[in-house]
Amino acid sequence: MQFGLTPDLRWTCRPAELIAAAATAGFDAVSVHADRVDPETIDAYRRTGLRCPDVLALVVDDDERRILTAAEELSERARRTGADWVLTTFTVVPPERVLRRCAAALDAAGVGMAVEFSPLGPIATLADGLRMLSIAGGSARAGLVVDSWHYCFGAGAFRDTAGAADSAFSALASVPPADIAFVQFTDALPPESDRLLRETLHRRALPGEGVLALARFAGTLRERGFDGLVNAEVLSAALRDLAPAELARRLFESTVRYWR
């Protein structure tokens, strides 16, 4: 098992500073937003020995020309950082032809398409994500991103919901580990409203400090045989003022205890 860190776009520290802090905390990898790939960032990966698992993000919408151009640009960023994946999200259900073309463009550069499903979009469920994966992976490298916030909110897997775990995690238990690009791991504060976009962008929580059924989530994947990369991704307004060293330490310590 390896542990990575997916940065909050609203963190003000430089990527190089975060990479150094993550290395000290014990992380193996740090993801990077495409617009923050620069010589300083690339040098930080080299100096610390940490790897870049994925570049964020390819947004699949209804503009085919823009998508394909973005896929080529992101492939170049991934090549420069040595990333394995380009994180891919969806605002529409794309035509199969378009999805295959995007996956092929990434594959030509030696990069895989990391398909992320979310209850906030049209690719809302695990089943939706697997369907996109089967299309994209027909002739190119592709993998599924399983985000604990997205999965648990979509499945209603909260600690305070009696019996939710048994039904919520049966589908997750059926996913072959080889189909998973990586996991994104976070907890969530009790929802204040049905504005889920606000909840996911600003009110996530350190693992163990929220309401998601994380022990069952991690246990299901471990029992299934998953032994890949787990990326901590805690988008939290309450944590954004922490110094990088303290932030990385708290993220690492709260994440790894579920997986070891």
Image: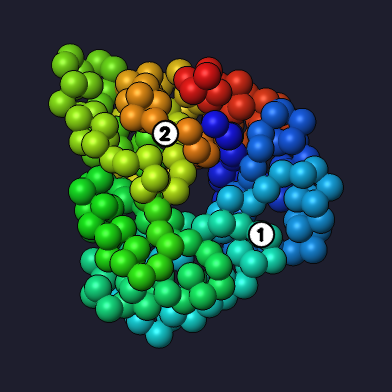
Q: Which of the marked residues, 1 or 2, is nearer the chain's N terminus?
A: 1
The residue singled out by tag 2 in the image is 226
Identify which residue is drawn at 64% across, 42% down.
29
Say if 64 sits above or below 140 in the image.
Answer: below
Could you tell whether 205 is left or right of 154 in the image? right
Q: Residues within 10 Å of mark 2 (few under 14, many from 20)?
A: many
Which corner quadrant of the image does residue 150 belong to? Answer: top left
Q: Foreground: 44 or 197?
A: 44
Q: Position of residue 127 (x, y in %)?
A: 20, 48
Colour option used: rainbow
Identify which residue is drawn at 24% across, 36% down.
174
* Residue 221 in sight: yes
Identify which residue is drawn at 61% across, 27% down.
252
Amino acid type of the residue tagged 1 in the rendering: Gly
Quadrant (top left/top right/bottom left/bottom right) for the N terminus: top right
> How far is disc 1 from disc 2 in space, using C-alphas?
23 Å
Q: Which disc is residue 49 wearing?
A: none
* Residue 120 in sight: no
The residue singled out by tag 1 in the image is 82
Identify which residue is drawn at 47% across, 57% down.
87
Q: Are marks 1 and 2 in contact (CB under 8 Å)?
A: no
* Mark 1 residue element: loop
Could you tell whether 44 is left or right of 219 in the image? right
Amino acid type of the residue tagged 2 in the rendering: Phe
